[in-house]
Image (cartoon, rainbow, N blue to C red):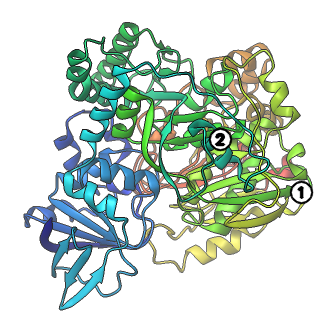
Amino acid sequence: MVIKGVITSIFPKDINTDDIVPAWTLQESTERSFFGKYAFSNYDNDFIGRSTKEESNFIVAGENFGCGSSREQAVYALQENNVSAIVSVSYPDIFYRNCINNGLPALIVEDVDDFQINKQMKIDLEKGTISYNGKIFNIKNPPEDLKSFSMGGKLGKIRTHLTALLAKKESPRQYVGHWDSLKPMTIVEKIVSDHLERQVFSGEKIDLPVDVLFFNEVIGPPAIKDFREKFSDVFEKNKKPVRVFNKKRVFFIPDHTVPSSSVAVSEGIDLMEEFAKKQQVKCYKEGDGIEHVVLIEDGYITPGEVILGTDSHTDTNGALNTLAFGVGTTDATYAMATGYLYDFEVPKTIRFNLKGRFKKGVYGKDLILYLIGKLGVAGASKMIVEFGGDGLKNVSLEERITIANMGVEMGARTAIFEPDDKLKQYLKKRSKFPYRFYFADKGCAYEKVFEVNLSDLEPCVAFPHKPGNVTYISKIKSYMEKSQKSRMMDFVPVSSLRITNAFLGACTNGRYEDFVEAAKIIKGKKVNSHVNFVVIPASRKVYNRLMREGILKIFVEAGANVESSNCGPCFGKHMGVVGRGAQMISSSNRNYIGRMGSRDAKIFLASPVTVTAAAVAGKIVDPRRHL
């Protein structure tokens, strides 16, 4: 297959999916053409105009193109603007898989320095070459991926596999777990090996059996539509009812925009509820909480499982010793039918050995911000980040959940923690499924190993517009001065530490412990008169407990706006969307351009106590002075 076209866009490194298509658009339509109208609307207003002038457009970009969320709509937005291929140094795994599934060539080359705007280019997928300006560039993608790009995806393979699955009754998986005499293995290698019943190591490409699959109301509706369109005839031909792979292990969770903010959102939730009822699977109620919180609370996430969710922060569940990560619409649709994730390459692992304990005023959020700042937003690209060590016993389970939640913000495929007594106690009388703990073997092959002394850390803050723009609170003024010299779009000048908005909540930091610590800051005080402080417990169970114990009352009396459980302003759709000129400090996980509203707003990321201290002071301050 040969593709000819013109380079109409050249982008820097770390272009994220919020840059490609804004989050607020995702629930407004299931039609691909809709998203084309908003391509790069927060980042590059001229993109659509340039693209419509050519029948075949090429994008050239620096490393890590497409980082951020699992939204497959980012791919649709590009294809609807005549983008025929992307050429970059690297891509995060979710975006790359979404490109394969939709037949958009996301090509990898050694470097992109030679390419220029408005120049002709020819791509030969069969030969694996790019012809440009009299030169030949070799494409580094695996040959099988280039074949998938040429064929427009891999739907045919999945339909064939579904037919085979329907024709026979598979025997229950027997998790072996006896690898002691073989080559040493990481935690993830062991989990994958047990699921395939043979020893598997990083770098191998496999079809991975899935234990738990869940959908939010952003991706659930289009996935249901695709599931019916792509697989109903296969079930019917095999005289089988149209069913999800396991009704006990598929979940639907409306959480991003509840209560609903539009007719489209409401109808999407209605569709999920109707489908769940017909399939006899669990669909949570609006207000029950965020997907990455309620499944853990209710015991559906247990060690050793393979967990897929239609959200990049599915890595949250790795705190419970699971292999958990986000996928796009197509991968989730395929998994809903067959119970498999196809062509999954087992990642390499980076190990973090923790020692010491946090000092007063320092928490898990500060640790993960510190690590993202050190490694960068692509520092663990496509790898697993594994946490363990003697210091782990001093990190609460809720803090581990926060740390795992933001593993994806350093480019990791997912995060995973060693199990221990704290996890065992949490699962007691809670777990819905049988489980076993997984530990790494001594001498297993890590890509890198980092030693982290928790005692050395202090409160951290991430500056706009990237989670990797991190500084210690003690150095915040000098970091602000550094920002004023920046000319980068993702590290913008900050001239003041004042804030107009604050948000405590999200899947990152909306749990019980987060509110207990934040309440120590605000008790007996008032929210600054110039600050809108939005407070959202991450689940109904957290909300009710905080209410029973009088903790929510502390926030209400201080002047905070307490809302029902949902993702809130993190998604930029409702409940605190910020306007032009706003400066928000948030306990959530992303601070991209336009992430929480206006593209002209600035968002800082910090721990719950740092957020709350800023809400009281009206500016970013060291929270340790108020504890």
Front-most of 210 and 591? 210
Q: Nearer the viewer, mark 2 or mark 1?
A: 2
Q: Amino acid at mark 1?
A: Lys
Q: Position of residue 333 (x, y in %)?
A: 35, 32
Q: Is residue 21 visible?
A: no
Front-most of 345 and 316? 345
Front-most of 469 and 225? 225
Q: Name the secondary structure under disc 1.
A: strand
Q: Quadrant of residue 173?
A: top right
From the viewer's perspective, is 393 left or right of 366?
Answer: right
Q: What is the distance, in whole Å, between disc 2 and disc 1 at their CAs?
A: 25 Å
Q: Position of residue 100 (x, y in %)?
A: 31, 53
Q: Position of residue 280 (x, y in %)?
A: 43, 8
Where is mark 1, residue-wise?
355
Q: Is residue 494 visible?
A: yes
Q: How many marks?
A: 2
Q: Amino acid at mark 2?
A: Ile
From the viewer's perspective, is 182 left or right of 102?
Answer: right
Q: Name the secondary structure under disc 2.
A: helix
* Residue drawn where x is 16% and y is 56% of the image: 81
Where is mark 2, residue-wise?
191
How packed mark 2 is, by other alpha carbons closer than 10 Å (few <14, some 14-19, many 20 or more), is many
How packed mark 1 is, by other alpha carbons closer than 10 Å (few <14, some 14-19, many 20 or more), is some
Which label was assigned to residue 18? Answer: none
* Residue drawn where x is 23% and y is 20% of the image: 232
The quadrant of the image that shows the N terminus is: bottom left
* Residue drawn where x is 54% and y is 59% of the image: 203
